[in-house]
Image: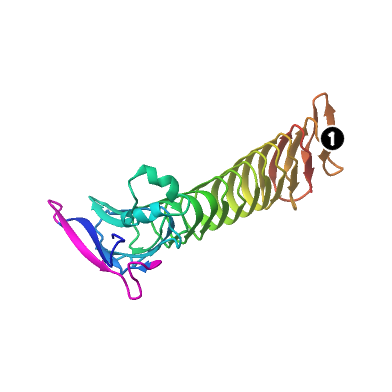
Amino acid sequence: MKVGSSLRLVQLRMRSCSGLAEIFVVISCFLLGGGTAGATVLNYKPLIMEVLPNDSLVIQGFEGGVKVIAGPSKSKEIQIRLKQENPEKLSAEAKSVLDEWHLSVQRKGDLIEVAIRSPQSKSIWSKLLLGGIPQFYLEISAPAMPLEIALRKGPVWIENWDTRMSVHLLSGGLSVVGGKGDARLSNGEGHIKVNDREGNLFIDSFKANLNATNCKGKMEISNFSGMTQMAKLNGHLFMNTSMGKVKLSGLVGRLDFENLDADLDLDGLQGEIRGQNREGSLSLDLKGEADVRIQSKEGPVSLRLPNSGASVNLGTAEGQLYVPNFLEVKRLPNLKWTRGRLRGEQPGSVYVRTIEGNIRIR
């Protein structure tokens, strides 16, 4: 869709049903009522394209937003809606290349590519990044198929998508609601929200805030400095954090973590816990049978083990041990340690070692 006139042309490369030849179709898409060539906001009529078996969908853009909603599973069409917002104040350079921004929709074999095309001149980009980029908002409805999205600035919203996806965002909001299948999500800054999802989940964040609720499957989480909040998880969670805060409640399964300086609050965990910690504080509230093995350098470790009869083995080189009186603390040249069994009913095993961090059992 060229943005220079009210008539927009989109070229679709579509393969014939027999797969033996390619045909080229040109579809005319008119502005909806109220839009003019000089308007700040341009709305376009929906574009509809056939979906074939084994298709996958790739969406590429710059700034704006993408909303993808799964249509009926028996649907054989993808519907694309586009809204374009031009900046109110444009430099002369940005105005000169405004017509070079357009939407391209192409079929490449089994791949449907939806992409925002940008000006090709490299010399203009330093000025465009200062505020001359139009905002393109795509709303797509289609039967679930393998999905890949790459966007400079969001938001991105994906709903009830029942197959694998990969989403890469530099900044903005990224939300995935419902559906199942492997999901690989990355965001540099903003937020990532995943709710009611089933399947393997891989999340990579630099300083985006992460919120995941009611997810089931293998999960690998890496968050450098954003806040991490997760609840009602079922599966095996691998977590790598550096700074910020982590609040995890209601995990059933296994937790493996590596943490530098983030403060970890782990509440209501049921299952195995294995972790390496450096300076961050670590608070654990466990349910059921305890199976814990943690090593910490400077960060304190606090354990709450209600009604636990677990066998404990706790030791610190330079920190302090705060344990029930019936556990004898022994002092060696390089270690203060205690070993024994708690007096509750739930079985289990707890092993904690620190260098400078205190260890406390409540």
Tell me if 209 is positioned left or right of 289 in this view: left
> Mark 1: which amino acid?
Val
Displayed quadrant of residue 43:
bottom left
Q: Is residue 27 magenta?
A: yes
Q: Nearer the viewer, residue 262 or 339?
A: 262
Judging by the rendered image, the residue that carries numbered circle 1 is 329
Q: Callout 1: 10 Å neighbours few (<14), some, many (20+)? A: some
Q: Is residue 164 visible?
A: no
Tell me if 24 is positioned left or right of 44 in this view: left
- Above/below status of 360 relative to 209: above
- Above/below status of 331 relative to 81: above
**Which color mode does the image show?**
rainbow
Q: Is residue 19 visible?
A: yes
Residue farthest along the front direction in this orientation: 92
Q: In the image, residue 280 lies at what x, y percent?
A: 70, 41
Tell me the residue at 41%/66% (across/down). 40
Q: In the image, residue 137 lies at what x, y percent?
A: 40, 62
Q: Which residues are magenta?
A: 18-41
Q: Could you tell me which secondary element the residue under label 1 belongs to? A: loop
Q: In the image, residue 101 lies at what x, y percent?
A: 33, 55
Residue farthest along the right direction in this orientation: 325
